[in-house]
Image (spheres, helix red, strand yellow):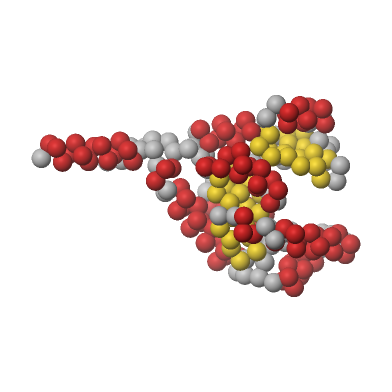
Amino acid sequence: MISGAVRRGLLLILSSPSGAGKSTLSRMLMAWDPTMRFSVSATTRSPRPGEEDGREYYFRDRQTFESMVQSGEMLEHAEVFGNLYGSPRGPVLAAMEAGTDTVFDIDWQGGQQIKQAMRDDVVSIFILPPSIAELDRRLRNRAQDSDAVIAGRMAKSRDEISHWAEYDYVLVNQDLDQTFDRLKTILTAERLRRERQPQLSAFVRALNEEFEAR
């Protein structure tokens, strides 16, 4: 019988242009498997009403954040609209050692930084929209942004989509449920990769001992 040795947790990176579905798919994945954790980013922006440190974000002042970057405590970081955002290394490594998988909902730049730092532990997936017209429709149906903001997101989408070939897997999100099924298939297969099953060596040794005992 195979023993229950704890495998090393993997880092699942989901990227897409805004509106293609990565955040929705991330939430669906976390609901499907509550043992997974969502990577909580650190930021220098001020908390909004109702936000708590360590839940939505780790809120840090700029000096502390920059010190964390210099000391290698960030897996990735970037400046967005005057505020710094990044993924603290400590909680991710602790989860990995405990055998817990971490989901990252980040852009291609952050994904590249994490792959460079943790290449053997990363599974990266890029989500494409079925068409640019559909991407525009989804952004407008949110009713969250002005026309100017939507235009900016659409302009940025072309650059983001150009990085699709840098990912391990690419899914076209034509149908959300079908895309989610494929996402679950990828995760299940990646968890079963030989190098992610530490118990196999001992199991095969036991099989060989059975041969010798016959």
- Whether residue 199 is visible: yes
**Residue 128: x percent and y percent?**
65, 64
* Image side of residue 80 versus residue 131, left or right: right
Q: Quadrant of residue 205?
A: top left
**Residue 23: x percent and y percent?**
67, 54
Tell me if residue 38 comes above or below residue 16 in the rendering. above
Image quarter of the N terminus: top left
Frontmost residue, 53 versus 136: 136
Q: Residue at x 55, y 49 (%)?
A: 123
**Residue 4: x percent and y percent?**
37, 37
* Image side of residue 2 versus residue 181, left or right: left
**Residue 85: x percent and y percent?**
76, 40
Q: Residue at x 10, y 40 (%)?
A: 214
Q: Residue at x 27, y 40 (%)?
A: 204
Q: Quadrant of residue 69?
A: top right
Frontmost residue, 111 versus 3: 111
* Image side of residue 77 versus residue 27, left or right: right
Frontmost residue, 86 versus 52: 86
